[in-house]
Image (cartoon, grey):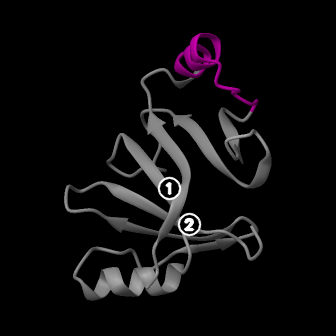
């Protein structure tokens, strides 16, 4: 059975995304990059890096990236096609069009509360 294997990213909207990014950078030490977000590389308890990362980003209030939600969690999955088929079969709203890019395959589902959930199958070997 296809399943979630981790969190690939956390995204949310803000009234003033530039100021909020700066607050997170200054007060919490989030390593905000020029593109407006951060990437946290995964490490084990001893601090040894291993393949994988979690993205973090803030969007403006009018961004269509998150649909009607104020936030979106991107879940890393092991078999996107199988999972989306299962969600459709169970009657959940799954947009027909996904996205396939150099970063992997993306799909979405609307949860029972109306939140847009992003599902991501990374490229092979990542």
Residue 101 within the segment the image draws in magenta: no
- Mark 1 highlights which residue? 74
What is the magenta segment's predominant secondary structure? Answer: helix
What span is in magenta?
A: 19-34
Q: CA distance from mark 1 to mark 2?
A: 7 Å
Q: How many neighbours does mark 1 have within 10 angstroms: few (below 14), some (14-19), or many (20 or more)?
A: many
Disc 2, SS? strand
Decide which of 19, 126 is in the foreground and name it.
126
Pointer 1 or 2: first along the chain: 1
Residue 62 lies left or right of residue 105; in this view the side is: left
Q: Residue 115: horizontal and vertical position, in percent?
A: 30, 54
Decide which of 114, 30 is in the foreground and name it.
30
Disc 1, SS? strand
Residue 107 lies left or right of residue 115; in this view the side is: right
Residue 104 lies left or right of residue 115; in this view the side is: right
Which residue shows up at 51% across the image and 44% down it? 10
Decide which of 63, 28 is in the foreground and name it.
28
Which residue shows up at 39% across the image and 87% down it? 85
Callout 1 touching callout 2 (CB < 8 Å):
yes
**As drawn, 99 above or below 81:** above
Q: Quadrant of residue 8?
A: bottom right
Q: How many neighbours does mark 2 have within 10 angstroms: few (below 14), some (14-19), or many (20 or more)?
A: many
**As drawn, 22 above or below 99:** above
- Mark 2 highlights which residue? 120
> Farthest residue toward the front?
46
């Amino acid at each position: 059975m296809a399943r979630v294997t981790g969190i690939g990213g956390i995204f949310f909207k803000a009234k003033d995304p530039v100021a909020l990014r700066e607050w997170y950078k200054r007060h919490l030490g989030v390593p905000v990059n020029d593109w407006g977000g951060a990437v946290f590389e995964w490490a084990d308890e001893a601090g040894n890096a291993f393949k994988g990362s979690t993205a973090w980003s803030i969007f403006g209030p009018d961004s269509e990236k998150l649909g009607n939600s104020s936030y979106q969690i991107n879940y890393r999955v092991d078999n996107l096609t199988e999972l989306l088929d299962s969600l459709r079969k169970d009657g959940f709203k799954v947009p027909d069009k996904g996205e396939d890019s150099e970063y992997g395959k993306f799909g979405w589902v609307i949860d029972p509360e109306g939140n847009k959930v992003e599902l991501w199958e990374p490229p092979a070997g990542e």
